[in-house]
Image: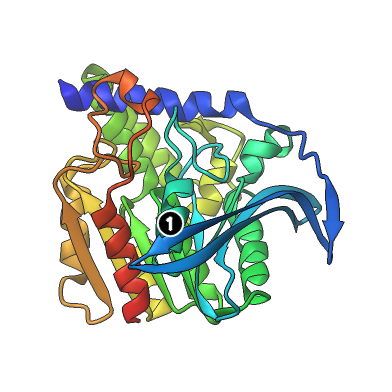
Amino acid sequence: MKRLISIIFLICVLVLSGCNADTSNTSDTTNGGETIFGESTNTSPNNGSELRIEEKRFLLPSDGYQLNAVYTYIDDGKARPAVLLIAGSGPSDCDETVGALKPFEDIAHGLAQEGINSLRVDKRTFSYAADFDIKCGIKEEYIDDCNAAIEYLKTQNISSLYLLGHSLGGQIATELAKNTADIDGMILFNSSARHLADIACDQYSAIDPVNKSSYITYAEAAKNVTASSAKGYYYYNASDHYWVSYNQMDTAKNISDANIKTLIINSKFDNQSFNEDLNLWSTLFSDSANVSICVYDDISHFGYKIDTSDPSSIYTRVDFPSEVITAFADFIKEN
């Protein structure tokens, strides 16, 4: 029952998150080609030493759009590892805000304490939802803007470049890593190698088991649609044109083709995934020298130790688990 309540609640959160899109993108100044909308600086201790941690907030240009972005970095003149944070499905601001929780902000600050820089960016579907029409797909939702973010990071004083994708963002990270030079490693956080339509089918079937056969039919239709057969039908809140673009991805093959160090982190407490998702990772990559798999018992889909069967749980700020930050940081620093 708790799993059922959690799935219902989180599906509602993902759908409703688009209602708060901020399309203003108001800027304050322009500096060196970057449109700045505010800067903040703090100094924080790290393992007994002082790190000057800064956050530069600016508008990242991408394909004619201006996306709110935050670069969190150590201001000491040293080249440091940098990570691009890639959000999951649905409209999402740069902090991947859900209720009072801001997982990407917390991850960015946690990584900074470990001496690792990071960049997080509003999704185009958050800031420019009205421009995401029926024929838009993965390229418009993710790839173009992530590529712009990667190019920005390459202009900074960094020693290595990593991708950290959450949920669907993890699958996107594999697509980027396969096609982008100079990616040193990637982290797939509460992601899956299964087709997104199959995961959606399981989620909806858990809510409405009487109509499971219909949800299976929707999933098969989404998985089999082609550019020539797409007519503007919707399956699981995405148009068949979107599914055409998604169907061109193969997460497992991407990981093999990218041939870079990969950390896969999932949780048995993630109510957005299923045992099949966890088992598939093990089946595919348990013997791979490049892939490390870690499964937690007690973190939710967004990473926090909260019980999402209680809808109010996301409206109380809690700390992001330090052990997960450490796992991210250790992987990055060891490679």
- Quadrant of the image for the C terminus? bottom left
- Quadrant of the image for the N terminus? top left
Q: Which residue matches tag 1?
A: 165
Residue 214 horizontal side relative to residue 140, left or right: left
| Residue 224 at least partly seen | no
User: As displayed, is residue 286 above or below residue 8?
Assistant: below
User: As displayed, is residue 168 above or below residue 220?
Assistant: below
Name which residue type carries label 1: Gly
320 or 50: nearer the viewer: 50
317 or 223: nearer the viewer: 317
On the image, the x and y values in percent for residue 138 come to: 57, 52
Per the image, label 1 sits on a secondary structure element best described as: strand
Residue 151 horizontal side relative to residue 297, left or right: right
Residue 149 horizontal side relative to residue 27, left or right: left
Instruction: Report the coloring of the rendering.
Output: rainbow
| Residue 206 at least partly seen | yes
User: As displayed, is residue 86 above or below residue 153?
Assistant: above
On the image, the x and y values in percent for residue 24 come to: 77, 34
Q: Count the marks: how many?
A: 1
Residue at x-position 63% and y-position 39%: 125
Residue at x-position 50% and y-position 54%: 86
Residue at x-position 38% and y-position 45%: 196
154 or 1: nearer the viewer: 154
Residue at x-position 22% and y-position 61%: 281
On the image, the x and y values in percent for residue 21 come to: 64, 30
Q: Residues within 10 Å of mark 1 (few under 14, many from 20)?
A: many
Residue 99 horizontal side relative to residue 58, left or right: left
On the image, the x and y values in percent for residue 253 come to: 36, 70
Determine which quarter of the picture holds residue 114. bottom left
